[in-house]
């Protein structure tokens, strides 16, 4: 049996996680190899395509979705990818009663009632085109908002939640429908950086360490996953949580398309994921 681990041209050999997964699958008599998603590849050679590090699709979402739709067997399933690549899914979660970061969609102007806020496009990955602004930077923030809107991109504006500066983000990873492990991501957006230079080299921003999920965090994460349309059987999921204004966890993002799963922070995560992939075959 053959499995393609879909990646991008910037990472033609995948990541350390991909290589660890391929090695674990080899032990189960499954041959897995990285394949660039938009390359001229014969996808019929593979019994299953697992979307992993397709991190360059955000400016070509239509092309990416057409590729996924054309695959006979892809995980997560193509309808899940279609729903998840656009962060307007946060509205569905909110409608289902899941606590999410408050969001204003395509506002005409920057907020005047939030001391700090984040502007980003609804289709993005890796904090691209994302910036943290203060009320004193309204003119620059307004230019950022206009730039995204002029490019035809849906814009989302969220308050910057100050607890992030101390607590960071908590990523809860689920494999084959079960909670596997958690990781903490140090704050990424530095104040006053604007669109460029979001991560300051050497200051620890964005660093990932192992973490423990609290009962409250697990509850919110499971509620978010239960709200995915159609209740699909997911191969993997990552729920990113941050403390809300009162310290209770709220969903920042629900990653079902190509998340870093931080497998090294789960003692049995690679084995669990490999067995789940083999079972899908």
Image (cartoon, rainbow, N blue to C red):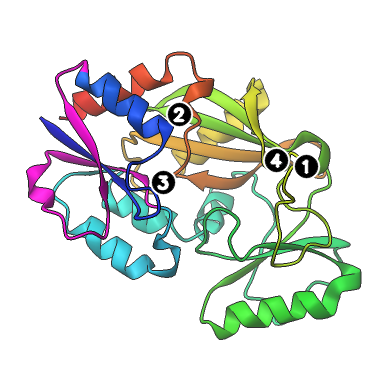
Badge number at residue 258 = 3
Residue extending farthest to the right is 136
Query: Label 2 crowding class (10 Å Cα cut-off): few <14, some 14-19, many 20+?
Result: many
Q: What stretch of residues is rendered in magenta?
A: 27-54
Q: Quadrant of the C terminus?
A: top left
* Mark toward the start of the polypeptide (1 vs 3): 1
Q: CA distance from mark 4 to mark 3?
A: 20 Å
Q: Nearer the viewer, mark 3 or mark 2?
A: 3
Residue 26 in percent (x, y) is at: 21, 21
In this rendering, the label closer to the viewer, 4 or 3: 3
Q: Position of residue 219 (x, y in %)?
A: 59, 28
Residue 174, numbered label: 2
Numbered disc 4: secondary structure: strand
Question: Count of labels shown?
Answer: 4
Residue at 43%, 53% (x, y): give it. Answer: 55
Mark toward the viewer: 1 or 2 = 1
For disc 3, the neighbor class at 10 Å (few under 14, some 14 to 19, many from 20) is many
**In front: 8, or 106?**
8
Rounded to the nearest angstrom, the CA distance separating label 1 from label 2 is: 29 Å
Question: In which image quadrant can residue 139 be found?
Answer: bottom right
Circle 1 or circle 3, nearest the eye: 1
Is residue 41 within the magenta segment? yes
């Amino acid at each position: 049996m053959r499995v393609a681990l879909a990646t991008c041209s910037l990472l033609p050999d995948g990541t350390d996680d991909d290589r660890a997964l391929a090695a674990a699958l080899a032990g189960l008599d499954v041959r897995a190899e990285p394949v660039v998603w938009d390359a001229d590849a014969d996808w019929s050679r593979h019994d299953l395509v697992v979307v992993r590090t397709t991190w360059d699709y955000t400016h070509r979402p239509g092309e990416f979705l057409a590729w996924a739709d054309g695959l006979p067997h892809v995980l997560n399933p193509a309808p899940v990818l279609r729903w998840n690549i656009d962060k307007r899914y946060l509205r569905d979660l909110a409608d289902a009663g899941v606590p999410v970061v408050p969001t204003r969609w395509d506002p005409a102007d920057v907020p005047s009632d939030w001391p700090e806020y984040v502007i980003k496009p609804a289709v993005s990955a890796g904090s691209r085109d994302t910036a943290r602004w203060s009320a004193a930077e309204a003119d620059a923030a307004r230019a950022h908002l206009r730039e995204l809107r002029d490019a035809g991109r849906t814009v989302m504006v969220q308050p910057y939640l100050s607890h992030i500066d101390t607590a960071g983000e908590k990523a809860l990873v689920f494999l084959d429908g079960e909670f596997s492990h958690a990781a903490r991501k140090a704050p990424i957006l530095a104040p006053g950086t604007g669109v460029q230079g979001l991560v300051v080299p050497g200051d620890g921003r964005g660093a990932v360490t192992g973490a423990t999920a609290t009962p409250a965090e697990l509850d919110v994460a499971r509620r978010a996953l239960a709200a995915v349309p159609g209740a699909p059987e997911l191969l993997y999921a990552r729920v990113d949580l941050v403390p809300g204004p009162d310290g209770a966890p709220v969903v920042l993002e629900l990653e079902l398309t190509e998340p870093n799963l931080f497998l090294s922070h789960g003692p049995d995560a690679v084995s669990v994921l490999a067995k789940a992939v083999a079972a899908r075959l």
